[in-house]
Amino acid sequence: MKNWETILKKIILTCKKRDRVNSNDAVYFHGWLMSQISPEFADELHQTGTNPLSVSLTVQDEKPVFIVNLLNQWAIEEIEPLLLNSDFVELDLTSSKQKTFEIIDKRTEDLEEKDLATIFYKQDAARLQELQVVTPLAFKSQGEYYNLPDVRFFFQSIMQKYNSIFEQTQHIDIDMLDEICSKVRLVNYSVHSRRYYIHKAYINGFCGRLVFYCKGTQTLANYVAMLLRFAEYSGVGVKTSLGMGAIKLKEEGNND
Amino acid sequence: MKNWETILKKIILTCKKRDRVNSNDAVYFHGWLMSQISPEFADELHQTGTNPLSVSLTVQDEKPVFIVNLLNQWAIEEIEPLLLNSDFVELDLTSSKQKTFEIIDKRTEDLEEKDLATIFYKQDAARLQELQVVTPLAFKSQGEYYNLPDVRFFFQSIMQKYNSIFEQTQHIDIDMLDEICSKVRLVNYSVHSRRYYIHKAYINGFCGRLVFYCKGTQTLANYVAMLLRFAEYSGVGVKTSLGMGAIKLKEEGNND
């Protein structure tokens, strides 16, 4: 019997207001995190298809906010004690120059696998799903990066991450993806391209607002809602552990 | 021997400032134009694959601007005398309510086939091409509308219109299109979806800014530049005769 014990954890570190925050600093934050973990976990990260860690850096009210999502138990055990340790009040990143971030608030959110099951099995999810792509998002297809909000690439990426985290396989149900592609429409959007620098190179991604509408069965709408809720933790597309592809769903109640 | 006599003509009608201009009024403007033409030309329009007429309504300095592009000799003979007639100073459109547009300026621009040949054969066209999609643009593929700035759909549409106007066939060179897809990148963009109402129904299109970069040969860059110049007259995508898919290239000199 399936157990519903897997927990995803979001750790939100709000820092003291700074002039000019560069969201590319998430790359250096990731580097710093990697320097803190055990060699065994580092090995694991290099081997798994989907990284059980997604990271982003955004700015809210001029304050830098680092978000770390931990997508399996091992990641939680390695990273949570480190970030929630009461001695950890300052983050020193070595990018082009040394940058210190003073942490003024720590907050966590959990998403249990059973919460996702509830969305899928019980809830009448909204057919209209609005979300913000907050850090540059890109897909990879046939060796090339692609940076438009294509419905197929979008949901394929989430399904792969979902299966990788919960089923230990990146294999997805293509019939289900086809069903999503035929029934889910990007009915409204406003997006712009944005380059994301990873050290000296960059990937061209996009940020902005997306509104999907699901005209399929309620079950499909529930499935789509569940995938999007999961994606708030996993991110979408490439390099989510380095700060790309973070999304945020619009609060419910505003969808109609 | 090929003659380079085909002329494309742009007629620009600037109207007196109005409160609230609805770019969907181009649909009614098209209806009015159709009521003025000969039955023979109307028959021709219904039969040809690519309409030799593209229309748009935009607003510049709060003034409605109707642009009519005439893409073959017959269209020029039918429409030009009508619009340039000195007695034609007021346009009455019957949409939801009667709307009168007072025409305060008329201007024409020509694009000869030999101008396009010059871009292709002689000019070292800029590899970076920036343009504005000024009225909602959508593509049709496999019976469905598609409203993202896909490179393949974009250039396929222009190549079809180009061949239709100059070669009387919508058949295009697929190898050339593949070459464009492999060498032309949408390196920068900012677009948003926008619905275009055609009477009671609507098509979901997009407007915004696109920057293409051609990393292929100079010949390919010239070809791309020529297609985009042509597209300022033909429009791109579906329903260009009803006001959709108007594009405007950024003035040269800013491309570097």
Image: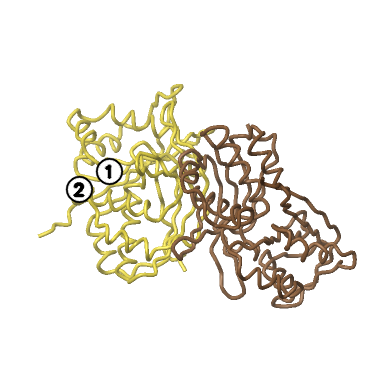
Chain colours: A yellow, B brown
Chain where mark 1 sits: A
SS at circle 1: strand
Quadrant of the frame with the N terminus of chain B: top right
- Judge whether B128 appears above or below B205 on screen: above
Q: Classify 10 Å Cα crowding around label 1: few (below 14), some (14-19), many (20 and above).
A: many
Residue A26's quadrant in the figure? top left
Q: Mark 2: which amino acid?
A: Thr
- Percent x, y for residue A150? 42, 53
Q: CA distance from mark 1 to mark 2?
A: 18 Å
- Judge whether A121 appears above or below A155 on screen: below
Q: Earlier in the sequence, mark 1 or mark 2?
A: 1
- Percent x, y for residue B211? 57, 42
Chain where mark 2 sits: A
Residue under numbered circle 1: A70
Residue under numbered circle 2: A169
Residue A251's quadrant in the figure? bottom left
SS at circle 2: loop
